[in-house]
Image (spheres, helix red, strand yellow):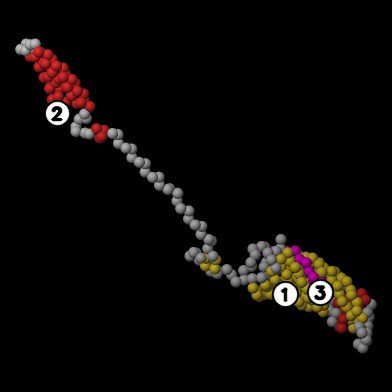
Amino acid sequence: MTFESRTRRAIFVLAVPRMSKFRLGGCANVVLWAAHAFSIVLALGSIALAQSTPRGGESPTDASPPEAPSAAPIANTTSPTAPEEPPPAEFPGVVQGGVVTAPRPAFARPWPTQRNFALLATEGSYGGFGLGLRGGWLRVGIDGSFAFFPIFATFSSNPEEFPEFKLLSSFQTNASLWIGLHRLDARTDLGIALGYKYNSLLRHGVSVAFYMQRELGAHWALQGFVGPNIFPEAEDQIRQRTGWTEGSVSSGIAWHQAGVGLSLAFFP
């Protein structure tokens, strides 16, 4: 029953006693008024029920508030860390990873330090015992040094007698041009050296020597020389110094001073 029909019914019930009180009397009126009171209570209950019942056929359970949607799970936005790749390994003529490079020269020096200027220390009978300077390039250069130069001289007036020995001291200035002719490997060079020498005792001289140079490190190189030093005035100068007038001086080859020596170069 709808709310409107219930309301009409309550109004009808309330109107019934008013129409009947003129026709009945006595006990009948008491019964009617009791029924009338009951009808009022019933009508009020019907009105209250009609107001509490939802319209449109919805059940009371449908009016409960909807549940809030659950929050979506938060996605992990942290990107995975890529593993570090090792540097590409280098091989002659190629770098692993597809990048091709020029092959390393077979005779390339292992150190990038300069070879245009050096300090020298000389030793031996080729250039004496002294200090000097070097200037030039990797395989061509000029050496200059000043050194103490001992001279070992012999004198014999009678071939059947034991010769007389004498050690003479002198000082010598050396200047030489050396040229590399063949490279054995990245650290070893072979060549020749042409030099001029002035000796305080033997006077002017020249030299021709074979040399080998070895790279010892980034700042060091060692040269070895083997070759003759020729002093044309050597015998006359030795006789004048010693007073040997007759006989043989240094077996007649005083002009030839055997040259064997070393030079250590430091490249700053």
Residue hosting label 3: 125
Q: Quadrant of residue 167?
A: bottom right
Q: Quadrant of the C terminus?
A: bottom right
For mark 1, give the secondary structure. strand
| In magenta stretch: residue 124 | yes
Q: Is residue 263 left or right of residue 21?
A: right
| In magenta stretch: residue 12 | no
Residue hosting label 1: 211
Q: CA distance from mark 3 to mark 2?
A: 141 Å
Q: Is residue 135 visible?
A: no
Would you place residue 55 above or below residue 145 in this image? above
Q: Are marks 1 and 3 in contact (CB under 8 Å)?
A: no
Q: Which mark is residue 1?
A: 2
Q: Of the residues shown, which amino acid type is indicated by label 1?
A: Tyr
Given the current orientation, which residue lies at the most extreme front position? 27
Would you place residue 152 above or below residue 61 in this image? below
Q: Which mark is residue 176?
A: none
First-in-chain label (2 vs 1): 2
Q: Is residue 49 visible?
A: yes
* Residue 128: image location, x then y, percent: 81, 71
For mark 3, give the secondary structure. loop
Q: Quadrant of the N terminus?
A: top left
Report the span colored magenta: 116-128
Callout 3 crowding tier (Cα within 10 Å): few <14, some 14–19, many ≥20: many
For mark 2, give the secondary structure. loop
